[in-house]
Image (tube, rainbow, N blue to C red):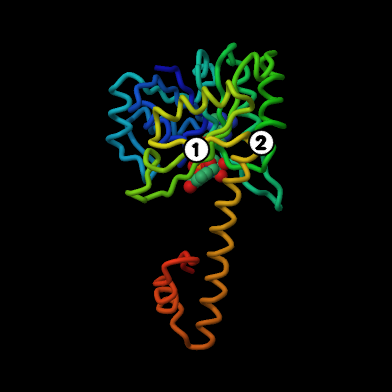
């Protein structure tokens, strides 16, 4: 079992950290928000999908250590980056991703693996994260350490498609990276789907997000249109949803 760091204990990072503990890893949860870390240390949860009992059980196992101190990241075999990557004025804000990468770089050892899960544009892992890791560690990605990207597909509140049962796209900057990334997730989820490089994995995540946004926006427009016409858009959506092919229901 590996020493794992999860950097960013939010909606994506906390369930992942819990799952890694259940899989038998020693997990350090690193978050810059000391308030969140305090709550976790007290066995509380602030994430809908993670019951407090799960946090308490993880602490009791002795294999989960939440911390807001960067030094707690030392000694990792696998580090997962799950920090926010918001859009600001239409541009991705990578400040948290850079800060987390630079922190992990300080503790990067030869042969260790860093996996990005945060959503970002194609090229982020290979052009930005890799450079921040190399700069801070003095090691060369590839021969020195492994890097990969694996987008999160969490659907808060969904009891059928959980972190464990949802297929996970995995990628690496080279064959060795892909192999360690896939090996790690095989112990975490039921099915992994390998793609040729982090760029394809990053774009796959953006395709999934865009598909959802565009279709919800379309239904919002149709709801207003239906309201003006005095048509029950909900009934119309339910009726359209009976089409067994070429249609997927979205609601306003
Ligand atoms: N929430 C979702 O449903 C969802 C689904 C798929 C992908 N994502 C993506 O996953 C990423 C994380 O999203 P989230 O919803 O978990 O965010 P979140 O805001 O819930 O949690 C992020 C956590 O990271 C911490 N953090 C910020 N900077 C840090 C740093 N430098 N080092 C360590 N911790 C730091 C914050 O304090 C916070 O606790 C984003 O890129 C998001 O787009 C989110």
Task: Specify the quadrant of the image occupied by residue 202.
Answer: top right
Task: Residue 95: give its label.
Answer: 2
Q: Nearer the observer, disc 1 or disc 2? A: 1
Q: Is residue 32 visible?
A: no
Task: Specify the quadrant of the image occupied by residue 127.
Answer: top right
Task: Tell me if 183 is positioned left or right of 174 in this view.
Answer: left
Q: Which residue is mark 1?
A: 193
Q: Residues within 10 Å of mark 2 (few under 14, many from 20)?
A: few
Question: Which tag, 1 or 2, sits closer to the chain's start?
Answer: 2
- x and y percent of residue 12 in the render? 47, 39
Q: Considering only vertical position in the picture, is 83 above or below 6?
A: below
Q: Are marks 1 and 2 in contact (CB under 8 Å)?
A: no
Q: Looking at the image, which residue is at 52% across and 88% down?
A: 229
Q: Secondary structure at mark 2?
A: helix
Q: Looking at the image, which residue is at 47% across and 85% down?
A: 231
- x and y percent of residue 76 in the render? 50, 17
- x and y percent of residue 72 in the render? 49, 18
Q: CA distance from mark 1 to mark 2?
A: 29 Å
Q: Looking at the image, which residue is at 42% across and 30% down?
A: 17
Q: Is mark 2 within 8 Å of ligand 1?
A: no
* Residue that sits furthest to the front in the current view: 245
Which quarter shows the N terminus? top left
Task: Tell me if 44 is positioned left or right of 237 in this view.
Answer: left
Q: Is residue 136 visible?
A: yes
Task: Tell me if 159 is positioned left or right of 106 in this view.
Answer: left
């Amino acid at each position: 079992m590996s020493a794992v760091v999860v950097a960013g204990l939010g909606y994506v990072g906390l369930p992942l950290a819990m799952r890694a503990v259940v899989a038998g890893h020693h997990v350090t949860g690193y978050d810059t928000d000391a308030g969140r870390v305090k709550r976790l240390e007290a066995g509380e949860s602030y994430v809908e999908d993670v019951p407090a009992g799960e946090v308490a059980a993880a602490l009791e196992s002795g294999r989960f250590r939440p911390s807001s101190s960067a030094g707690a990241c030392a000694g990792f075999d696998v580090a997962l980056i799950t920090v926010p990557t918001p859009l600001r004025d239409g541009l991705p804000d990578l400040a948290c991703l850079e800060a987390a990468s630079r922190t992990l770089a300080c503790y990067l050892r030869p042969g260790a693996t860093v996996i990005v899960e945060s959503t970002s544009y194609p090229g982020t892992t290979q052009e930005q994260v890799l450079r921040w890791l190399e700069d801070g560690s003095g090691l060369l990605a590839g021969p020195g350490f492994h890097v990969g990207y694996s987008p999160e597909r969490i659907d808060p509140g969904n009891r059928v498609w959980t972190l464990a049962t949802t297929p996970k796209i995995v990628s690496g900057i080279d064959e060795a990276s892909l192999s360690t990334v896939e090996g790690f997730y095989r112990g975490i989820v039921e099915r992994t789907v390998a793609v040729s490089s982090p760029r394809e994995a990053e774009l796959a995540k953006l395709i999934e997000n865009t598909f959802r946004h565009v279709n919800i926006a379309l239904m919002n427009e149709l709801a207003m249109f239906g309201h003006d016409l005095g048509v029950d858009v909900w009934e119309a959506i339910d009726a359209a949803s009976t089409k067994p092919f070429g249609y997927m229901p979205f609601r306003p």
